[in-house]
Image: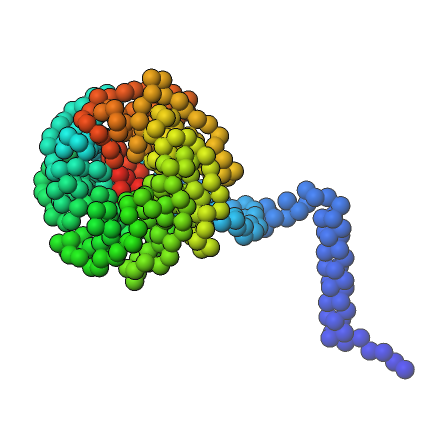
Amino acid sequence: MKIFQTSEGHLGLSAALRSRVVHILFALIFLFAVVSPAAVVFAVVWMAPPVATGSAASAGIQPERLLPPPDVQPTSLPDSPYNVYANTLSGAVPCPLCELPPRVYVPNSKAGTIDVIDPRTFSVVDHYRVGSIPHHIAPAWDMSALYVDNEGSSSLTVLDIHTGKPVDQINIPFPYNLYFTPDGTKAVDVVERLQRIEFRDWRHGWALLKSVPIPWPGADHLDFSADGSYLMISTEYSGVVARVDVNSMQLAGSVRVGGLPIDVRLSPDGNYFYVTNQGRMGVSVIDPVAMKEIQFIPTGRGAHGLQVSRDTKSLYVSNRLEGSISVIDFASRSVVAKWQMPGGGSPDMLQLNPEGTQLWASGRYHAEVYVFDTRSGKLIQRIRVGAEDHGLTYFPNVGQHSLGHNGVYR
């Protein structure tokens, strides 16, 4: 058999040889890359697009990456524990309220007057008359005004937050205490004398929405659940804490704690209500779901006012009849410190400065205001005011809105 070499055969052989050479060359390059890590860098750099230079670079064109970006894997952090008072943790007054000079407004129940204190100098800078028996000064829900509840004259004196002076009067029956629902839709007038609370439309002429009878004497202090759907109110002279549905505006249950329950405050986790008990000399811890007292924490004679610390880890309790402040740790539900007042006193309602470094207390039976250093527990100032000073407020303060009373913020 004869074999004839044609031009096509010659070309095919040449192509085959070239293909074999190419394969051998790539095999050698691959071997070199495996043996030498430097070759990898060389290959990437050699094949990367050119870097802009000269006038293009000076014109603001950014150079391209020489290496691909790292492989960033998605990550997530665990959710923070729920905290009712999360908006108060910063210790910073929201603006434009931050532009107002700080003031402490003190209602003198027996004198029927207001003393205004500059907390930077601890001096009284203003003094004027209001209605009869003013008990507390409540910041409005949106902190646009301050309301003095004049129980004896069935009125609210409206204070201008810029001047600190009275500008108006609102007539509602016997306001002992004034609160605002967490959503800001309703005001709650606590009418202790008539054993009822009144839900009112404070944005539209304070019109009465509904009156809810409280069938136990002494209804005076309250706080709201975390979602604002209900409130828990103390009835001082009956030893009962009642539950009221905020949406239907009707009584929804009660729990008997005995003694003389006074101030009420929700725990930061929203699970329990703490209620001072002046008769039992301590604080009741109430489970609002089971509607029962799950613990009692002894603090001192005349346990009266409550204030959550700025870091929300502690609860300050004023022991009005023995002149002391107890500090309850929320985590252990136990008293971890007690601040005795040199020379005695009668601390009543409490307030913190925005930073949480000073605890202010009205001195109900001594016509003076007390200031404690929360870092040391020392009494650092006594300030003379009018007779039977009661629910003082430090304003402006932290938080997105006010629930009323003498300044409860969330």
Q: In the figure, residue 375 lies in which quadrant?
A: top left
186 to 266, vertically: above or below: below
Q: Nearer the viewer, residue 279 or 389?
A: 279
- Locate the N terminus by quadrant: bottom right
Residue at the top extreme, as displayed: 343
The coloring applied to the image is rainbow
**Res 180 seen here:** yes
Q: In the figure, residue 278 lies in which quadrant?
A: top left
> How far from the left and from the top, in percent, is residue 136?
22, 38
Q: Is residue 174 left or right of residue 73?
A: left
> How far from the left and from the top, in percent, is residue 50?
51, 47
Q: Residue at x 17, y 31 (%)?
A: 110
Q: Residue at x 76, y 74 (%)?
A: 9
- Locate the C terminus by quadrant: top left
Q: Is residue 141 left or right of residue 300?
A: left
Q: Nearer the viewer, residue 67 or 209?
A: 209
281 to 238, vertically: above or below: above
Q: Residue at x 44, y 53 (%)?
A: 291
Q: In the figure, residue 99 lies in which quadrant?
A: top left
How many numbered marks are there? 0
**Res 140 seen here:** no
> How far from the left and from the top, in percent, is residue 31?
76, 50
Q: Nearer the viewer, residue 406 or 358?
A: 406
Q: Is residue 176 left or right of residue 400?
A: left
> How far from the left and from the top, in percent, is residue 112?
14, 33
Q: Residue at x 70, y 44 (%)?
A: 37
Residue at the bottom extreme, as displayed: 1
